[in-house]
Image: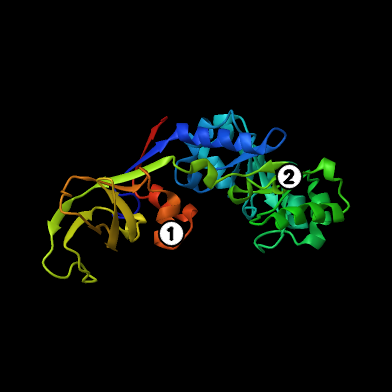
Amino acid sequence: MVGMGPSAHVKCQIDLGRVRENVSEIRRVVGTGVAVMAVVKADAYGLGAARVVEAVSDLVQGYCVFSLAEAAEAEIQRRTGKQSLALGPAAAGVGADAYIAAGVRPGVCSVEQAEALRAAGPAVNVDTGQQRFACPAEKVGDVMRAAGAREAFTHASRVEQAERLVSVVEAAGLERAGVMLHAAGTSLLSEPAARLDGVRPGLAMYRGAARVSTRLAEARDTRGPVGYTGFLTPRVGVILCGYSNGYRTGVCVVNGQRRRVVEVGMQSAFVELAPGDRAGDEVVLLGGGLTEAEVAGAWGTTPHEALVRLCGCGRRDYGVG
């Protein structure tokens, strides 16, 4: 639909060199013997999975996607020669051959799924508290045996959940040494007890690697209430990015100074300005000191959501530093 998706007036510059630096630092922190599986779901958090997987292929052991379709669209196996793990629910009605062709190991949570996808080398998604398309603890042994699985994982936000993954597998009568276990995403990378046999960094790969900007389309001193909401400010500017592009009210940077984004319309937004700000000046929506976390705080959401939304606001351009 015209008017939906990226704005032609917003530039999203992706620094692949910074992504590599972030992954290298993750490798240093977790140490040798721990596999790094780069999370590139949701088109690599909006940075572009096809480009990201190639940029870090020599630094990681594999990739994590949400679905078979994501891995196939990005052609991860063809581009890198490495496999992906699908963290989301197994695709209904899709057989093992499709997973094998795309180099994807499906995540399974039932005996039926395990048996149907056994040839694709599935991993068992174990429920340790999130209660989302995962196998209950008491059924893990049956599902692992039905799958012939040598890999199990969980979605964890606390160290205790990673530890529970280990105890559940051991309680199922499976040899711990023969099963690859992983639980830690970005929030648990600094916790040695959560790293197990592998880690799945997502946001940690992408911090500081995207710079999103646009230009002031208009700048003026105001005469009374402004916009649909009738807000008051002495000087205001307009950028051509709105909620149809994924943008929200919050914070931006104009001429090196933090400014409030006070009202967002469908395809434009109002920004509070200082007296010296003029039409044509750059407005930074992310980067240049404005972090994902700061935007997320202003939006009342997570840095993950802020990054995905902002990278979807404009057209991507790639660099290495």
Q: Which residue is mark 2?
A: 196
Q: Is residue 129 above or below residue 81?
A: below
Q: Residue furthest right?
A: 173
- Which comes sooner in the sequence, label 1 or label 2? 2
Badge 1: how crowded within 10 Å, few (<14), some, or many (20+)?
some
Above or below, 90 against 225 in this view is: above
Check the picture and name the quadrant holding the N terminus: bottom left
Q: Position of residue 104 (x, y in %)?
A: 64, 41
Q: CA distance from mark 1 to mark 2?
A: 31 Å
Work out whether residue 19 or residue 175 is closer to the camera in this orientation and state it: 19
Residue at 66 percent across and 57 percent down: it is 158
Depth check: 38 or 160 in front? 160
Quadrant for residue 16, please give it: top left
Q: Tag 2: residue type? A: Leu
Name the quadrant of the C terminus.
top left
Q: Position of residue 69 (x, y in %)?
A: 55, 46
